[in-house]
Structures are given as structure tokens and as C-alpha cells.
Amino acid sequence: MPTITVRGDIAEGLQPPDVSTAIWKELQPLIARLPAGYRIEQGGSIEESGKANRALAPLFPIMIALTLITIVVQVRSISMMTMVFATAPLGLIGVIPTLLLFKQPIGINALVGLIALSGILMRNTLILIGQIRHNEKDGLAPFDAVVEATVAVLVMFEVRLGFTLTTSCTLVDPPEASTPRFHVTSPVPAL
């Protein structure tokens, strides 16, 4: 099918998805007047992000189910599993400010980074629960077991801080990652 690809560079300080969205809105009157068989499609980072999101979408329920099953097996309690899983959204506390600071859209890199940070948070919660249980078996009162476990986890926090900061930096797409792109497709003429 004959295709014309239109590419463009963007001004300093603008993000490709923002520019593509603005251009797409401006193209709507033209798209409405196209003859039958002609179409305009978005390309570039919007197209690639859409492909990645469509590929990941069916895996999310499976991933969540496997995560929940793994947590239940580890903690042997539905209430503890709920508590551990409830810490996953706390990753947004790191993701949102990072994206805002670097003026980045929520793309595939941010999504993968958010999943990684959520995993780190759930892992830390599992470690904390394990340490609390260990402290209680050693004879500490529940309150003292929590305090001692928290201190132990905070000491380990210093080691994990570097990893967390590195993960946060992966949320940002490199500036040359993509330029806005549109494809104009026409029907094949009859011979």
C-alpha cells in the first residue's frame, strides 16, 4: 500500500508525545475530509508506546495473580498478603515527582520502572514481616519486635537507596528516543 511518512524535529523543551497529540488534534478536520481508503496514522513514540501497552495488557492479570499467589505462599496469610500488596502503589510517590521533575510522559519506561519500584516495596515489606516474626519468636513483645525489625530494615535501606535511585532514573526517556511521525496511506490504484 503506498504510504507517505512525515517526520519532524521538535523545538527544545517539548516532548514528542505532547507534540504528536497537538498535531493529531489539528489534523482531525483533514482526516474527516479524506476520501474512502485514505487514512492518517500516528507513528513514532505514540505508536511504539501503544504496541508495548497492547503487548503488556494481557499479561497484567497473570502477573498480579502470580504475585498474589507467591506472597500468600511466603506469608501464609491472606491478611498479610493484602498488607504486602497494598504497599505496591506507594511506588507512585517516587515515580510521579520524577516524571514531573523531568517533564516526562508516562511511557513504557515509566511503567516498567513503576513495576520495579512496586516490587522493591513489596519485597521490603516481606523482609519486614519476616524480621518481625523472627523477633517475636526470640521472645520480644509485639511492639518491640516491630521497632527492632524497623531499625534492621532501615539499616538495609541505605544499601537499597542506590538501587532505587537508579531505577527512578530509568523512568526518563532519552531526548532522542523519538520524533513525532505520521503515516498517510492511500489505496492502491486499480490498473
Image (cartoon, rainbow, N blue to C red):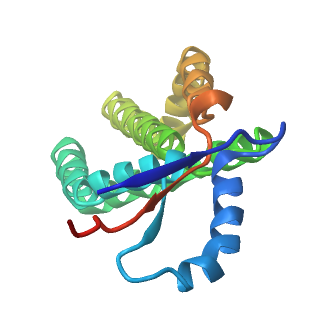
Q: In which quarter of the image is the C terminus?
A: bottom left
Give 14 or 23, whichever is nearer the viewer.
23
Query: Left or right of 25: which side holds 86?
Result: left
Give the residue drawn at x 68%, y 63%.
Answer: 23
Nearest the eye: 65 or 154 = 65
Q: Which residue is drawn at 55% across and 85% down?
A: 32
188 w.r.t. 69: above or below: below
The answer to whether residue 68 is seen in the rendering is yes
Q: Residue at x 78, y 45 (%)?
A: 14
Task: Give x and y (percent) for residue 106.
Answer: 58, 51
Relative image position of residue 113 (x, y in whole percent): 50, 38
- The answer to whether 157 is drawn above or below residue 95 in the figure is above
- Judged from this view, the residue extending furthest toward the front is 191
Nearer to me, 7 or 189: 189
Quarter residue 3 falls in: bottom left
Q: Can residue 174 be seen in this view?
A: no
At x 52%, y 26%, the residue is: 153
| Count of marks, rendered view | 0
Q: Quadrant of residue 147?
A: top right
Question: Horizontal and vertical percent for residue 83?
Answer: 40, 57
- In the image, 50 versus 9, the foreground residue is 9
Q: Tell which residue pokes out farthest to the right in this image.
A: 12
Q: Is residue 158 above or below residue 14?
A: above
Q: In which quarter of the image is the N terminus?
A: bottom left
Q: Position of residue 186 (x, y in %)?
A: 39, 66
Position of residue 116 in the picture relative to residue 133 (left or right): right
